[in-house]
Amino acid sequence: MTSGKVRPVNLTIPGTRRPSFILTLKRLRGSVPCYVLALPAIIYTLCFGYLTLPYMLIAFQKYNVRKGLFGSMWIGLRNFQAFFLSNRWIVVTMNTLKINFFAILIGAIFAVVMAIVLSEVRFKRFAKVNQSMFIFPNFLSWIVVSYMVYGFLSAEYGLVNQALKNNDLSIGGMWIWHYLSPASS
């Protein structure tokens, strides 16, 4: 019979040792280029995957900018209740699903067509430039694009109005209010 003492179980494979800390560091040091390559993905994941998680609390709060994320009043599921009790929640949800479906569908069709067209182009440099031009917008957010458009079309400081003013092409010496003037028919 046993005396009641429990002996720890040895889970290592017989004839092998656990690598020392120094050996582990040496192995890691040999992989530095791989870690440098992974660094942008790690930073992106931290910024947009983990640092944004606390802001999901806003859906359950009566959010006040002055009080901040942790000072705002907690209201639980009332925001969701207000949304689902409104008479437009089905329309809003269906519109969102339709927009996403057609964006995926049109994007996939366009990508396949462009891939076929660019594979048939004789001038490979032209094909590479066009590929870059089609891929580049994926790296910009709509906020950045809107500020770029605003920078071009701003009435007082925009690039277009400055060029028109400097070349005496502005209408009566006035700025053109691109955002406010109605579209010409």
Image: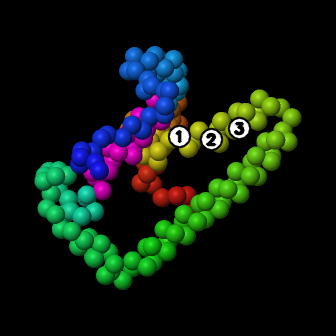
Q: Between marks 3 and 2, how big is the CA–CA gap? A: 9 Å
Crowd tier of the residue under label 3, counting other residues whose Cα lies within 10 Å: few below 14, some 14–19, many 20 or above: some
Outermost residue, front side: 1
What is the image's colouring?
A: rainbow
Q: Which is more N-terminal, label 2 or label 3? A: 3
Q: Mark 1 = which residue?
A: 139
Q: How crowded is mark 2: few (under 14 residues within 10 Å), some or many (20 or more)?
A: few
At horizontal 28% and vertical 76% (from top left) the residue drawn is 81
- Picture coordinates of residue 36, whole percent (x, y): 49, 24
Magenta stretch holds residue 35:
no
The span picked out in magenta is: 39-56
- Residue nearest the observer in this picture, 80 or 183: 80
Residue at disc 2, secondary structure? helix
Residue 52 is one of the magenta-drawn residues: yes
Residue for badge 3? 130
Q: In this view, does 103 lie above or below 85?
A: above
Magenta stretch, main secondary structure class: helix
Q: Earlier in the sequence, mark 1 or mark 3?
A: 3
Residue at (45, 54) in percent of width and height: 181
Kind of element beneath mark 1: helix
Q: Where is residue 57 in the image (x, y as percent from the top left)?
A: 25, 58
Which residue type does callout 2 highlight?
Ile
For the residue carrying disc 1, how many other residues have a C-alpha within 10 Å: few (<14), some (14-19), or many (20+)?
A: few
Q: In this view, does 81 lie above or below 42?
A: below
Q: Do the residues labelled 1 and 3 touch (CB within 8 Å)?
A: no
**Residue at numbered disc 2:** 135
Seen from the viewer's position, the closer of residues 141 and 32 is: 32
Q: What element carries label 3?
A: helix
98 to 119, vertically: above or below: below
Q: Quadrant of the C terminus?
A: bottom right
Whether pointer 1 and pointer 2 mark residues with C-beta atoms closer than 8 Å, the reply is yes
